[in-house]
Image (spheres, grey):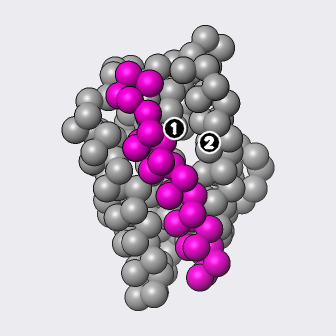
Amino acid sequence: MTTTFEINHTSRTVLSKFLDNYTLAQLNTIPEGFSNNLIWNIAHIVVVQQMLVYNLSGLPMMVSDDMVSKYKRGTKPEHSVSQEEVDALKIFLFSTLEQAQKDFARDIFKNYTEFTTMSGFTIKNAKAAMEFNNYHEALHTGIMMQIRKFI
């Protein structure tokens, strides 16, 4: 799992640079032809990791139900995110990852409800969920790299 977490940390570092280098208005901008914005993609990434690894393991998530309802699959930006929300999200980027790493080291992931992703991959345990999460984050990072060209 060491490599999985190293990859994920690198991904989260790239994402945090979006939060550091774009204005609040830019983070909230939905360019023509896109259905979401930079900040939605980052929040979505955090929420999906929590759902895939913790929720499907029957464990409490670090994110609120409100955050899940705003950023889970099938949602789109419904409001402009405030600077306070951006600041909280920047903390979540790394705190959720650090907690997952600790929890894997403590071997707390005993149960898992299998889940087949939209790409057709069936996740059978929390380890596979964390590994698939890196693929998911890469997809959304690619979308963000496209969005930034238009804001």
Can you say whether 28 is above or below 93 in the image?
above
Quarter of the figure with the N terminus:
bottom right
Residue to which mark 1 is pinned? 41
Front residue of 92 and 57 = 92
User: Type of residue at label 1?
Assistant: Asn
Q: Position of residue 130 (x, y in %)?
A: 58, 67
Question: Is residue 135 within the magenta segment?
Answer: no
Q: Residue 13 carries which label?
A: none
Question: Is residue 16 within the magenta segment?
Answer: yes
Mark 2 neighbour class, 10 Å CA radius: few under 14, some 14 to 19, many 20 or more? some
Quarter of the figure with the C terminus:
top right
Q: Where is residue 48 in the image (x, y as percent from the top left)?
A: 50, 50
Residue 126 appears in view: yes
- Separation of disc 2 and disc 1 at Cα? 6 Å
Could you say whether the residue bearing mark 2 is in a helix, strand or loop?
Answer: helix
Question: Which stretch did the figure color magenta?
Answer: 1-26
Q: In which quarter of the image is residue 68?
A: top left
Residue to which mark 2 is pinned? 140
Can you say whether 2 is above or below 78 in the image?
below
Q: Identify the mark nearer the N-term, 2 or 1.
A: 1
Furthest residue in direction right, as rendered: 120
User: Type of residue at label 2?
Assistant: His
